[in-house]
Amino acid sequence: MLRIAVPNKGSLSEPAISILAEAGYRTARRGRELVLTDPDNDVEVFFLRPRDIAVHVGRGQIQAGITGRDLLLDSGTSAVEFRPLGFARSTFRFAAPIGAIHSLSEVSGKRVAASYDYLVRAYLRDHDIDAEVVHLDGAVESSVRLGVADLIADVVETGTTLRTAGLEVFGEPLLESEAILITREEYRDDPRLATLDRRLEGVRVARSYVLVDYNVRENDLKAAIAITPGFDSPTVSPLVDTASVAVRAMVRADGVNRVMDELHEVGARGIIVTQLTASRL
């Protein structure tokens, strides 16, 4: 039985549980169960603290988990990234009082406050920077004003919180993080993991694409196909009106309205868009 771990709270929890549910696994809890058995798919789903998932996977007690790349790297375990999942993206940056520090080399000898101290230490070590890393569980932005640190390393979204604290980012990002599927090297070829991976990838692709159906005269078919080349190629079927054909193609969801406009301009009619719920490509 394949054991899969998902976060039981935090920003990763809901989207991780959602993608697993859309992939056909049982995730609905009646209360606050920590484990769900899904006999139809031969899996157990464990609801764990986000920071503990990489630890359990790294030790081999659980074969797969959904967590953040930041949490994996900060865990220091032997778990490895298997596939990025494309949601819960975040960026880690250094930030210091405005005008105080301009480059990574100036961090040497300074105190860096961070919640992800293992990750930050590894980054500084890899760049030959000798600095003290001060671990904080939260409110990292306040550490400079409180005199605990000279600068911080933390997740940056809009930067509003940093500016409120009198801080600004500098240097290159430490890390571009997102939700990922993790495992151990020894499980990479496990057929059960391969099934999970195919299902999750199928959901990810389905969320990114829609199906577009339309009718177009054969004389305009080449121009229409240039607009909707499809994932591999479009499906073209004859109509009773032999001067026209029906076309079906996968199109990126974020650009579908522009595609519909362009299709209409080249003569396509009866344009219909259908949402996808799953796929195997």
Image (cartoon, grey):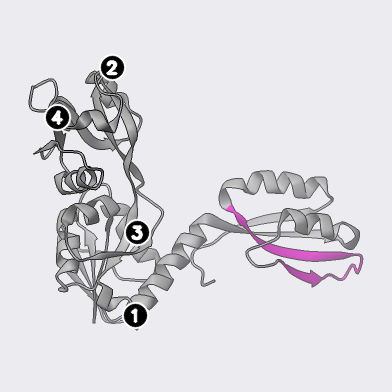
Q: Which residues are magenta?
A: 234-252
Measured as percent of width and height from the top left, residue 236 is found at 77, 69
- Residue shown at 27% from the left, 81% from the top: 39
Foreground mark, 2 or 3? Answer: 2
| Disc 2 from disc 1: Cα separation | 50 Å
- Residue 217 is covered by the magenta coloring: no
Label 3, secondary structure: give it.
helix
CA gap, disc 3 and disc 1? 25 Å
Three-letter code for the amino acid on which mark 2 is drawn: Gly
Q: Position of residue 91 (x, y in %)?
A: 33, 41
Tag 3: amino acid: Ser
| Labels 2 and 3 touching (C-beta < 8 A) | no
What label sits on residue 189 in the rendered view?
1
Residue 130: mark: none
Reading the chain from its start, which is encountered first: label 2 or label 1? Answer: 2
Q: Earlier in the sequence, mark 4 or mark 1?
A: 4
Disc 2: which residue: 99
Q: Which residue is mark 4?
A: 110
